[in-house]
Amino acid sequence: MNANRAALALAFGVVAAFVVTAMPLPFWYLPMHNVLAIGVKPKGLVIDYYGRVLGVVIAAALGFALGKFAPPSTRFAKLCLVWAAFGALLAIGLSMSQVWNRPLQPITLPVPK
Amino acid sequence: VPELFLADAARPLLVLHALSAMTLVGSSLHLAVLGALLLVRGRAPTKLIRVHARVAPVAFTTTFALGLIMYPAFRVLVRGVVLDRDAPWASNAFDFKEALVLVGIPIALAIFAAGRRFELPRDASSTTLLGVLGIALGAIVLVAVILGIIVTSVKGP
């Protein structure tokens, strides 16, 4: 049943979006060196967004796969929808609180001689 | 200056990103209206739902992928050097947009899964799910596009 697979993919993915917003996965991209790193967060300028995206995509795909075994009921899809709405509100609210008036450190690029 | 991934192609990629976003806005807002019809009346043109349940997720994926590809150049040359110094509010708005779009990934996937072969009355059990998701995707895309335009116009008039 496509609705159940869709609903479970949604619930898993949105909850993952909240989790990776609260705590980025240990998967980093260093744009200045053009390398990926896994493990402890490296020093300097790092991008954690690719790790976050990966986490959400994997979780949503897992939910989609597990949805095959979910009970074929409208109530189940609605429960997933409510769960996802709750997760989305948490993720968006947390993200807003993280960036609100956040102080930032500009980069100074080396000047070519 | 460090060698950034695809920095030379950043401007054409930004144009493609914007063109893809235009398609996404059009399709996802159609889907939002169809979703509202599904929720209010319990029915809507199913052929249109099937079309936009395919177009919107594909456009979402394309727009998102293009954004990811040019992100390193943006992060260093635009955000790191300019926005973080001159307009930190814009950097924060962009990061909020990132988080918002992250929530959009499972929504787009679910719309594709539930709506691409949508048929009434066979899929009557999916109407609430599809209606809510259509409205949610439309809202997320609209806010993301508005924030994107604001951020890219920081150095504009």
Image (cartoon, rainbow, N blue to C red):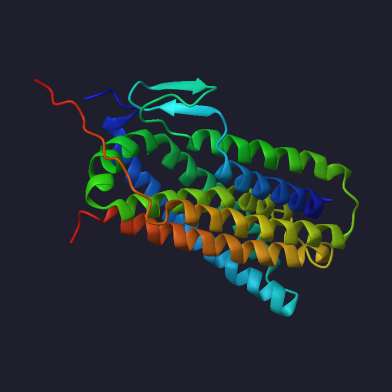
On the image, the x and y values in percent for residue A50 come to 50, 34
Q: Is residue B129 above or below residue A6?
A: below
Task: Residue B79: name its quadrant.
Answer: top left
Q: Is residue A40 left or right of residue B14?
A: right
Please tell me which residue lies in front, A83 or A57: A83
Please tell me which residue lies in front, A104 or A10: A104
Quadrant the C terminus of chain B occupies: bottom left
Quadrant the N terminus of chain B occupies: top left
Residue beneath the point at 63% across and 44% down = A19
The residue most toward the left is: A113
Residue beneath the point at 31% across and 27% down = B4
- Count every numbered label the image shows and give the total: 0
Task: Residue A61: name its quadrant.
Answer: top right
On the image, the x and y values in percent for residue B22 come to 42, 57
Q: Is residue B36 above or below residue B133?
A: below
Q: Is residue B11 left or right of residue B42?
A: left
Q: Is residue B95 left or right of residue B55?
A: left
Q: Is residue B5 left or right of residue A64?
A: left
Residue beneath the point at 34% across and 48% down = A103
Task: Residue B46: name its quadrant.
Answer: bottom right
On the image, the x and y values in percent for residue A68 come to 84, 43
Residue beneath the point at 49% across and 38% down = A49
On the image, the x and y values in percent for residue A44 come to 36, 27
